[in-house]
Amino acid sequence: MKRSREQAASELFAALYPRLAGWCRRLVDDDGTAHEIASEAFTRLWSRWTSVTEPRAFLYVTAANLVRDHWRRLDRERKTVRRVGTEAAVRPHTEPADPSVRMLVQALPERLRVPILLHYYADLPVREVSAVTGRKEGTIKADLHAARELLRAHLRRNLDHSR
């Protein structure tokens, strides 16, 4: 039985790791960090292997949490650097004035951010997002709508200010 468990885990890794790492790469904008996050998600899955019923969803939720932690760590580092007075070292001059969609998603409240990450970035259907988060499908749909409206409003404001 142990052999089949390891074989199943190996097959799952081969099937899902490249896409999970690519998804993380789009969110953190760094290959090394993306691979660390994807690997950590698989490590956590392996430690709970017998109790996880939806491995793909577990991986993406775990990775989303790790990405969020990464973003928070970066934000703390930026604030620290700002306090010291070396803002230029953190924000290169080539950075555009308009915030990226990633930063806008990061700024969403967690109840809206998690469904956006899982549905649009991890390509999970609403049904799976509902199962993973333990919230009703109607609630997930409403949260996705609310998040899209917030993002749309913010992008419109940025466009209006740039003209």
Image (cartoon, rainbow, N blue to C red):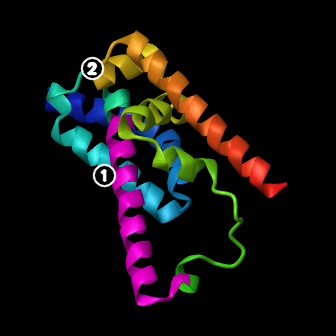
The single residue placed furthest to the right in the displayed view is 163
Residue appearing at x 21%, y 30% in the figure? 5
Give the quarter of the image for residue 6: top left
Residue that mark 2 sits on: 134
The label on residue 40 is 1
| Residue type pointed to by label 2 | Gly
156 or 98: nearer the eye?
156
Residue appearing at x 17%, y 42% in the figure? 47
Question: Is 62 on the left or on the right of 117, as rendered?
Answer: left
Residue 76 placement (x, y as % from top left) = 36, 69
| Residue type pointed to by label 1 | Glu
Residue 21 placement (x, y as % from top left) = 48, 48
Q: Is residue 1 magenta?
A: no
Is disc 1 in contact with disc 2, using a CB cutoff of under 8 Å? no
Looking at the rendering, the stretch of residues picked out in magenta corresponds to 59-87
Residue density around tag 1, few if under 14, some if 14–19, many if 20 or more, within 10 Å: some
Secondary structure at numbered mark 2: loop
The label on residue 61 is none
Instruction: State whether residue 128 is above or below residue 94.
Output: above
Residue appearing at x 31%, y 52% in the figure? 40
